[in-house]
Amino acid sequence: MSQNRYIQIIEKIFFEKYHDNITEIAFSREDMVRIAKELAIELPKNIGDILYSFRYRIELPIKITSSAPENYEWIISPAGRSLYKFVLKKMNRIEPSDLYAEIKIIDSTPGLINKYAFNDEQGLLAKLRYNRLIDIFTGLTCYSLQNHLRTTVPNIGQVEIDEIYIGLDKRGAHYIIPIQAKGGNDKLGIVQIEQDFAVCQAKFSTLICKPIAAQFMANG
């Protein structure tokens, strides 16, 4: 039921300004409120859930996706405080590739953590931490700096990073490693990685930025 409401709102926002050859469509939170009133739709208490759903959980409506040129797709990107935009991109979802070999690692997560952890981003972040998977993946010595960093970035607005690591290589170079973790059916999008680059540039400009996306897979 919620998805039907969200689809009606997002379609009307898009097609109010859409025309051939357009590559960006700007809109605001106020636009969502206005359109919901016009359509006599009751908004959720958290209006941001509309955008979160289309960015990470479900695909944009077929009416919108079918308007994109071949090899392109529409994504929703932040554009400032309470401001957003549809943008044409060549790549959106970040998904595992069968072309890469799997690296087998013994699970060193403490039994008590495995027993009570949920199959969500917090459980995934715990496994990354206890198994030192960030160290193994990057080849760096890494230390967790902060969980759930929430900050603002110019021209983007509020950004939240699931966890940030500081890394050190054998030459003594320092790295900032923002982690985006997803559990369940949530999807990882390129927008999140672009936002992580922007945060690193704004807040950690002297460090080497190496964003990482992590997700549970069906085979563990």
Image: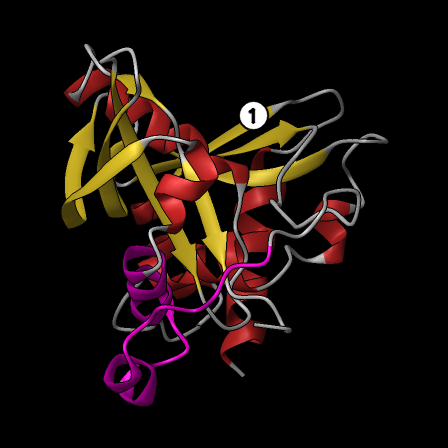
Q: Nearer the viewer, residue 18 or 109?
A: 109
Decide: is 42 above or below 157.
Answer: below
Tell me which amino acid carries mark 1.
Glu
Which region is colored magenta?
104-130
Badge 1, how many Cα within 10 Å: few under 14, some, many 20+? some
Direction from residue 132 to residue 25 in the image, left or right:
right
- Residue position for label 1: 24
The answer to which of 182 and 99 lies nearer the viewer is 99
Q: Is residue 217 above or below residue 199?
A: below
Q: Quadrant of the N terminus?
A: bottom right
Q: Is residue 10 inside the magenta stretch?
A: no
- In the rendered image, is residue 123 in sight? yes
Q: Position of residue 99 (x, y in %)?
A: 79, 43
Q: Residue at x 19, y 41 (%)?
A: 143
Q: Residue furthest bottom?
A: 115
Label 1, secondary structure: give it: strand
At x 53%, y 57%, the residue is 54
Residue 136 in the image: above or below residue 116 = above
Which of 61 and 158 lies nearest the eye of the viewer? Answer: 158
State whether residue 28 appears in this view. no
x 33%, y 73%: residue: 44
Where is residue 120 shown, x and y percent of the image? Answer: 38, 72
Left-right relation of 198 to 191: left
Q: Quadrant location of residue 129?
A: bottom left
* Position above or below: 77 against 95: above
